[in-house]
Amino acid sequence: MEISITVTKDCNLQCKYCYQGKHIEKIQISFETIKKIVELIKDKLIEYNDSSLDIVFIGGEPLLAYKKIIQIAELLNANLSNVVIKYYITTNGTVLNDEILTFLTQKKVDVSVSIDGNQNIHDRYRVDKQNRGTYKKVISTIKTLQKNNVKVKARMTITPDSAFTFYEDVVKLFEQNITVINPVCDFTCEWKSTQIDALKVAYRRLADWYIKMVGQVQLTCFDGRLYSLLTRKKLFCNAGIGLHYVISTSGEIYPCNYVTDNPDFLIGNLRKIKEPSEVREMYLEYVLNENIKCKECDANEFCYGQKCCFLNWKTSGYLNSISPIMCQHEQFIFTLLQEILMSLCRTNSTEITKLIQYIDKNKLGNKTYDKLRGKLWNMI
């Protein structure tokens, strides 16, 4: 079960590409709402016979409400002693104090810090309310987290402008001793053909570098998707249907953070949540009858557009219709990942060998694995 909890709508920054910007308000979740959330989670874990729980703290900037976060964790741990709970948070990296640091360390929170490569790129987009860049502050926060053994990764937004320096920006982060990097393309804006071409060039350079650096750096755009490349079947996530909810500061429940506070996708509150059948019925209004283009695509099982229906809605207006830029991106990454996989096999990567053996032993392979199986086994 994964529950995302919006602890505040407030944010101390004014990032220029923020899709939540119009919702920023100085509102924090109340303790009464927190108690009801804990009760709801207890009931849902029993209903679905689940003994593990992922809690994701979101905002705004969630650490502006760190006392609320601590309250939530304390209540959950006190009430769910037989449940394995993992905590996650994405922060802009400008809010840190001793109490926050202690909490992140003690609870072993998985922290994603938003940072966009080099200082010039980062400070162009991630600015405070006075339009000042935040790069130096964010780097300082990351180093403090690393020093205290907090599991930290860099969440890097790739925009059309930053596509030209994407490769160099990743390397720059690695040179800052950041070894887990999560590059994410902004598919909600318009991309020109020259920017898409630049992105593809950067990905190819990054792939060459990644193969040389394997074992020293984790790039979620590559090693984070190799398993999906070979095993994932065409299936949307279960947002809003049983095991995945987003809860607003007021206790309203939505399927995904892309549609939080959108009344069209409200699926309940802390007293009552729509049944899965009702949620699916509600989704049908935003579904195209048939999507032949995606159905015939070789990458359709792998494609992120066949997983994140609400990102589709955000960019196309339909849950099952992928935007043109995401389509190009996913087809390119699908091909590039196969090339990376073959290169790693040729270098006798132990991890890749284990991955292929595991997939084969457990019969997890999809149509891409079936297509590549002969070549892969010949090399390992």
Image: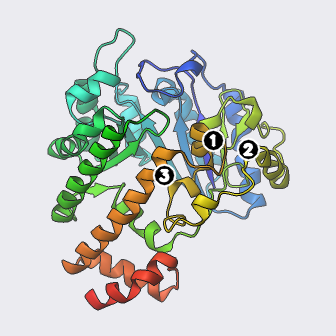
Q: Which residue is mark 3?
A: 327
Q: Which residue is drawn at the image coordinates 76% and 33% (left, top)?
A: 264
Determine the secondary structure under disc 3.
helix
Q: Nearer the viewer, residue 10 or 365?
A: 365
In front of the other: 98 or 224: 224
Q: What residue does disc 1 label?
A: 313
| Labels 2 and 1: the sequence-earlier one | 2
Q: CA distance from mark 2 to mark 1?
A: 8 Å
Q: Position of residue 114 (x, y in %)?
A: 36, 35
- Disc 2 is placed on an element classified as helix
**Residue of label 2:** 286
Q: Nearer the viewer, residue 120 or 248?
A: 120
- Is residue 363 shown left or right of residue 14? right
Mark linked to residue 351: none
Sequence-wise first label, 1 or 3 = 1
Give residue 323's position: percent from left, percent from top.
54, 45
* Badge 1 density bin: few <14, some 14–19, many ≥20, Cα 10 Å: many
The answer to whether the residue labelled 2 contacts the one labelled 1, judged by CB atoms less than 8 Å apart, is yes
Q: Residue furthest top?
A: 130
| Quarter occupied by the N terminus | bottom right
Q: Earlier in the sequence, mark 2 or mark 3?
A: 2
10 Å neighbourhood of mark 3: few (<14), some, or many (≥20)? some
Kindly report which numbered mark, 2 or 3, lies closer to the viewer in this rendering. 3
Check the image and tell me how it is coloured: rainbow
Number of residues whose C-alpha sits closer than 10 Å to that of mark 2, classed few (under 14), some (14–19) or many (20 or more): some
